[in-house]
Image (cartoon, coloured by chain):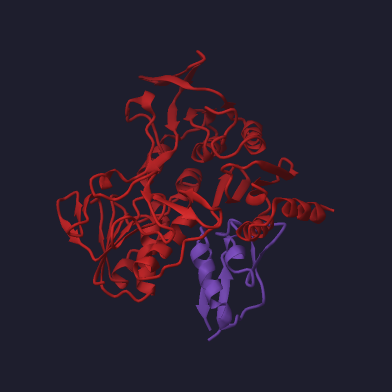
Chain colours: A red, B purple
Amino acid sequence: MDRIVVVGGSLAGVNAAEALREHGFNGELTLVSAEESLPYDRPPLSKQMLLEDMAPEKLLLKPTDWYEQNGVTVALANPARRLDSATQRVVLADDSELEYDGLVLATGSSVRELSVAHGDPRLHVLHSMEDAVRLRAEFAPGKHLVLVGGGFIGLEVAAAARAQGLDVTVIARGPAPLSRVFVGDVGQWYQGLHERNGVDVRCGSALEAIEWGVDGAVVTLKNGNVIKADIVVAGVGSTPAVEWLANSGIELSNGVACTPDLKTSLPNVVAAGDIVNWRNPIFGEQMRVEHWTNAVDQGRHAASTLLGNRDPFASVPYFWTDQFDTKMRFVGRTTGADQTNIETMTDDKLVATFGRDGVLIGAVCIGSPRQLAKYKVAIQNRTPWDEAVEASLTAAR
Amino acid sequence: MAFKVTVDLDLCQGYANCLIEAPALFDIDDDTNKAIILGGDEHDEALRNQADASVRGCPARAIVVEDL
């Protein structure tokens, strides 16, 4: 293998490039990115970038000279437009073509559009460094920010804005925030956290319209409520960025359909990060994971697969969110959970575990990082649910 | 070759990934929720893979491994 192309200036893409060199690949290596900036870290966009006015340079995943030192040619602001698998070429936006012997797909996610906004540029989203800079510039104490969406990014933006003295309203479609991931107590705990900090949380609310005037926006809900806003932010999720692969012949199914070792349906093409839909042997479940740690680990795994490794990618997903002064860390899954155990619940701490078919599959830990590490191991070992609950009761005694 | 591990506690956010990747090298302080390094200033080469994994796995990029 002489030429490897990595498509996506993402966390997964950079980790794939790094691992390829670590594993001894010394041929041509090109990293293709849609963005103007060198690859950067995204979690701080909804946290430190909004709270502390963090300089964008601090977000870079690797120092500027890392790419040259590691023989990685970088094509910036030049997204891949097409994949021709028959001739093993990637066509970029500027019509240039890159031939490959091996290809890593790591294009990540695209932000989901809010249909009632009709693409109005006054609606903020938070996906790129530029989005964060633009949103932060509008923050000022006393302004009213309306956040559409009760997911993690939305709640982080709400917390950052509130901490800087803005009035904040969150409009969540579900019965509680975070209801796409958690049923019941965890979402309610977050609702309580936001309300104690002065955020107006409106659950079970669907959006009817957003109208912009000279001095801000008017947001109308389906129940007839009307809310005036200075800033409107949409945080309604993301979709795998795979449109450019539509005519490549690759198998797409909720992202890119992959084998357990992260190969795609095309020869010499592997994938990593948000776009990967694979069967995780630890859970015996087909999944797609949009988390930071998954991007690092899959980037590295896909690189070794391309170079001949055949191990399946087995992992316990890990996720975190920082809001106000609380830090939630989550390991595992909640999908299909049929058991929940609340181990601890106070205003500062929450430890809850989730089980499915008699096996421990997930744990939420707020203010309890040690518990998190313990549960990660227990999930990996497919600990029976009863045993996990019994152990937590024994520990509490 | 032995190595030394350090954690920048200003950067550490208590993600606990280090504890997951390298349980022989790290613990978390219950009061501060920040990482603690176990076993002194000098670590045996046998723990190198764990140490490298903890560097890669730290979202706060707070961990540094140096050769001694």
The outermost residue toward the bottom is: B1
- Residue at the spot x=32%, y=30% of the render? A121
Residue under the image location 62 percent in, 72 percent down: B25
Q: Quadrant of the N terminus of chain A?
A: bottom left
- Residue at image position (65%, 46%) is A354
Res. A10 visible in picture: yes
Identify whether A333 is placed above or below A199. Answer: below
Q: How many numbered circles are shown? A: 0
**Left or right of A90, for residue B64:** right
Q: Is residue A253 left or right of residue B13?
A: left
User: In the depicted view, which residue is nearer to us: A387 or B32?
Assistant: A387
Residue A326 vertical placement versus A116 (above, below)? below
Asked whether residue A63 appears in the rendered view, the answer is no
**Residue situated in front as seen by the camera: A8 or A215:** A8
Q: Is residue B67 above or below residue A324?
A: below
> Where's residue A314, x and y in %?
51, 60
- Provide residue A369's location: percent of width, then percent of height: 65, 56
Foreground residue among A375 and A381: A381
Percent from the top left, x then y, of residue A199?
A: 59, 30
Task: Give residue B6's position: percent from left, percent from top.
Answer: 57, 71
Q: Going by the picture, which residue comes out furthest to the right?
A: A397
Looking at the picture, tell me which residue is in the foreground, A77 or A176: A176
| Outermost residue, top side | A224
Q: Residue at x 44, y 25 (%)?
A: A230
